[in-house]
Image: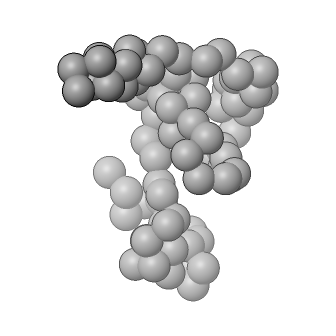
Amino acid sequence: MRKKNSDRKQRARMYITRIIEETIKRASDNFPVVMVTGLRQVGKTMVLQKCDPNRKYVFLDNTADRRPAVEDPELLFPIRP
């Protein structure tokens, strides 16, 4: 059992550099909003945090968070601290 836990901790510390990082950095320099979509559990949040740890994030998985984006997108970002 200890081996499994240490393997999980080791994997959690590993980070795989992604080709898209430079594109995200350039987009962040030129646009106030950058959207990243993709399959679940592939590292979208991790790569964004790696590219800019101070950037604010909005996750639209939750219906309550998604509704303002659909109904009135201009209100979505000012309500986020």
Q: Quadrant of the N terminus?
A: top left
Asked which colour scheme the image uses, the reply is one colour
Evaluate whether residue 9 shows in this view. no
Q: Residue at x 43, y 41 (%)?
A: 56
Q: Which residue appears at 48% of the width and 58% of the height? A: 59
Instruction: Name the spot of residue 81 as percent of width and height, x first.
Output: 32, 51
Pick the residue in front: 31 or 19.
19
Place residue 65 in its image quadrant: bottom left
Give the residue at the far bottom of this rendering. Answer: 71
Residue 13 location (% of width, % of height) = 40, 16
The reply, left or right, for residue 16 in relation to residue 10 is right
- Whether residue 76 sits left or right of residue 39 in the image: it is left
| Of the pair 53 and 20, the residue shown nearer to us | 20
Total marks in image:
0
Location of residue 24 in the rendering, given as x and y in whole percent from the top left corner? 70, 30
Q: Residue furthest left?
A: 2
Q: Nearer the viewer, residue 73 or 8?
A: 8
Which residue: 57% across, 22% down?
51
Q: Residue at x 57, y 84 (%)?
A: 71
Q: Position of residue 46 (x, y in %)?
A: 51, 32
Residue 79 visible in rendering: yes
Query: In which quarter of the view is residue 9 placed?
Result: top left
